[in-house]
Image (cartoon, rainbow, N blue to C red):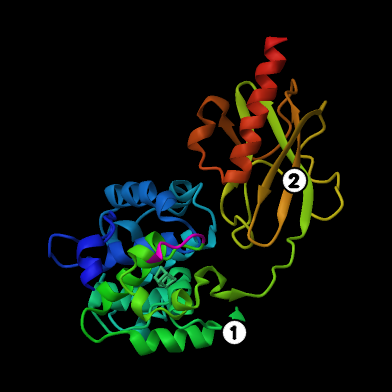
Amino acid sequence: MRWYDSNARSLPWRVTDGSRTDPYRVWLSEIMLQQTTVAAVRPYFERFTARWSTVEALAAAEDAELMAAWAGLGYYARARNLLACARKVVAEHEGSFPCTEAELLKLPGIGRYTAAAIAAIAFSKRAVVVDGNVERVVGRLFAVEQTLPAAKAELYRLAEKITPTKRPGDFAQAMMDLGATICTPRAPRCGACPVSPQCQAFHLGRPEDFPRKAPRRAKPHRQGRVYWLEHEGEVLLVRRPAEGLLGGMLALPTGSWSEALAEDGVPAAAQWEDAGAISHVFTHFSLTLSLACAIPERRDAQGIWWPVDRIGEAGLPTVFAKAAERALQWQSGLFGR
Ligand code: SF4
């Protein structure tokens, strides 16, 4: 804790002036940080809190408006849950987040880790907060031999053992900061570490060997087609079904994504030109999308026709933003010929 008092990272969702921590900001930051880095989250957090400064304001946001603001941050189910959670807090808790882990767990998008983090950081409740950083620090402190993910229960048990009753929120953040800045996955700076005298992995002389991980299986690869259909300065977009990958987001029309390339999903009969391919990696698979572009004379397809010069404002998920960028390159080549 002494180390944290003088080394805490300055983060926009942290209170450093001694004033009360705002549960709304803690919750928002924790949801954004799930599966995402601090550097990626920072500008989104600042934009979100400038635009929706309270949970009531966020609950009143339009679905499409929020999804567009979330675009680029990935894992879009989080955005849908964010809105559902804000609305539930307003409707059922009069706009105040509940303060216990058990109550927090009943809210959409809040799992074991997030409930513990909010209870500890926003409400100073003793809660065992274990994210990837904490797993690494604990795995090294106790030189846990069992491999992840099976070791999760053991790492949780050990984290529970060292979680204090006093300042539990600061303790959780101290562990996260230690993992993020000193006890890093590669080349941990044990010489600067406040807990090296107690660290078993350090004493063994091989901190990087912990926590042990089961070998990863290679991600499957999928491929598909994506279409850029343009007419009089507008491009055809579609809203993806609410459920499933990138659900509820605006997107370019696309066919099925599978092991073998299928020629489906063509939004209209037109003279399609091959405009190359883009690649993207999702959590469970990698994807190559072949881009087909057409600028037909007639507007035959149904969907949302969006101004090409404002495509950056459509809030396209990254995979489609990449395809749009590629289509614009194709288009500039076409008109530059
Ligand atoms: Fe991590 Fe090294 Fe500190 Fe152990 S001594 S917790 S391995 S930085």
Picture residue at 27% right of the left edge, 80% below the top: 99
Of residue 269 and residue 321, the one placed in the foreground of this image is 321
- In the rendered structure, find residue 288 and report the number of the disc placed on it: 2
| Amino acid on which disc 2 is placed | Thr
Please state which of residues 258 and 58 is positioned toward the viewer in this rendering: 258
Which residue appears at 63% of the width and 21% of the height? 232
Whether 313 is drawn above or below 61: the answer is above
Viewer-proximal residue, 59 or 208? 208
Magenta region includes residue 188: yes
Mark 1 residue element: loop
Is 90 contained in the magenta span?
no
- Tell me the SS state at disc 2: strand
- Residue at x 29%, y 77% (from the top left corner): 120
Residue 110 appears in the rendering: no
Residues in magenta, as a range: 186-190
Residue to which mark 1 is pinned? 146
Q: Position of residue 322 (x, y in %)?
A: 62, 38
Residue 113: % across, % down: 43, 76
